[in-house]
Image (spheres, helix red, strand yellow):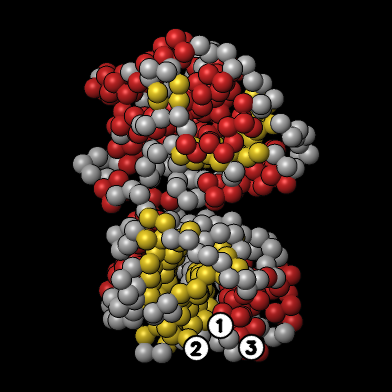
Amino acid sequence: MCGIVGYLGKKPASSIILNGLKGLEYRGYDSAGIATIEYGKLVISKRAGKVADLEKIISHANLHSTIGIGHTRWATHGEPNDINAHPHTDSSGTIALIHNGIIENYLTIKKKLLSDGYTFTSDTDSEVLAVFIGDIYNRTKDLELSVRLALNEIDGTFGIVVISTHEPDTLIAARRGSPIVLGIGDNEYIVASDASAIIEHTRQVIYLSDNEMAVINRDNYTTKTIANETTTGEIHEIEFDLQSIQKGNYEHFMLKEIYEQPSTFRDAMRGRLLVEEGNVKLGGLRNVADKLRNARRIIFLACGTSWHSALVGEYMIERLAQIPVEVEYASEFRYRSPIIYPDDVIIAISQSGETADTLAALREAKLKGATVLGIVNVVGSSIARETDAGIYSHAGPEIGVASTKAFTSQLAVLSLLALYLGRTRNVSSVEGKRIAEALLAIPEKIQYILEHAEQIHEIAKEYSNAQNFLYLGRGYNFPVALEGALKLKKK
Ligand code: GLU
């Protein structure tokens, strides 16, 4: 799942889209492409390689259009090459589409289209969707309807944006399982897979829900489900600032985010610790306070780094609140037949709030009637919206692929949760105060470690050629050792 940017406004679309794609490069990709409508015709430039390579071709293309779409691809179907890069078009070359995700039933649809005489140029599942939309358009002559009807036949995940020369002032975006954010600016709209590609233009955004689409025209837009029911399209304000998605003077984002930890840890606790009472105030849990007080069991659902923080959470909650806790790998949970009791509380943990397995697992738990909470970082993300209540970790955007500050912020939030639950059970105010004070002292301790980075550097140099590392840890440090090992495995 990679990067999507679409633009409709008054400015030249290509440079805005290229900039947006650059902002999404950190997610990794293998090819990039862009489509605009120039004097009534689709102009598509795409190639394997970097956005900078795409920029070189585009600089000769003389693009003026104020509508366009751009994509960075992470190949799932068909190798990373120029032809498989997005955008893809329908067979008439009048409808262009960019797609994140996987069309699971693309082969069935492709076979049908082949038997109807259509041909394909790429190996992708995405082109099948483009040709399918075009096929329906030939009959309906209505772009929105064609997109809707096509999407209703699709199994799998998609974040798409579509433009067409038939309706050169319309941008259509839709999602299922792959995020799409619509930014509403002054006489302009920018659609992206991630709010960080939008913030330069506007802070007013709508996060599309699964099976929701936005139909955007020059002076208005509507949101609806792909079954054509109108939706409210609630407008949110992006909370982070531009600086938080820029590298500043750091060599890379991961380093910047490591250094942000004293403040991100503090931000996770801000306004939540009641030191004198030895207690915690978590506004996001207000409507589930009774459920939590009476919880017989807590089940954490998470993957990767979040799974490690859940393990730390398990130890803390069992110790302070004496509530049995289970930590489930979300991908396993969703494919089992998990037993869930009415007084279980399920907590999904995810930095992005979009982790597909965690989202699917929480939906499974919800279906079984469980109370489902979320601990997520990205405000307005799917997990945040689909849970009954939750706690934001407030770490700010995490751009580095290897999680750092998001992990420690999750630990901060889990400590707060453990103390909160402990106080509803057997932790006294004196003990609570001691824990609250210890938590407040942590940012300074992180700061102290960072100030001695030189020593860490020396150790790293000494062992940089080692073939194997063994991380040892007991108790709380066992999951931390797992997380440390995970960090070293990533390159
Ligand atoms: N499945 C599509 C492809 O292989 C989209 C990949 C992506 O999400 O970037 O082209």
Residue behind mark 1: 143
- Tag shown at residue 140: 3
- For residue 348, side relative to residue 407 (left or right): right
Q: Residues within 10 Å of mark 1 (few under 14, many from 20)?
A: many
Secondary structure under badge 1? helix
**Numbered badge on residue 166:** 2
Could you tell which of marks 2 and 3 lies nearer the N-terminus? 3
Q: What residue type is labelled 1?
A: Leu
Q: What element carries label 3?
A: helix
- Vertical order, 116 against 296 (above or below): below
Where is residue 89? Give x, y as percent. 53, 78
Residue drawn 34% across and 73% down?
Answer: 188
In 3D space, how far apart are the residues under numbered discs 3 and 1 (Cα atoms)? 8 Å
**x, y (%) of residue 177?**
59, 56
Task: Work out whether residue 54 or residue 226 is closer to the camera in this orientation and state it.
Answer: 226
Q: Residue 153: in sight, yes or no?
A: yes
Q: What residue type is labelled 2?
A: His
Asked if the residue under mark 1 is in contact with the one under mark 3, i.e. CB atoms within 8 Å, the reply is no
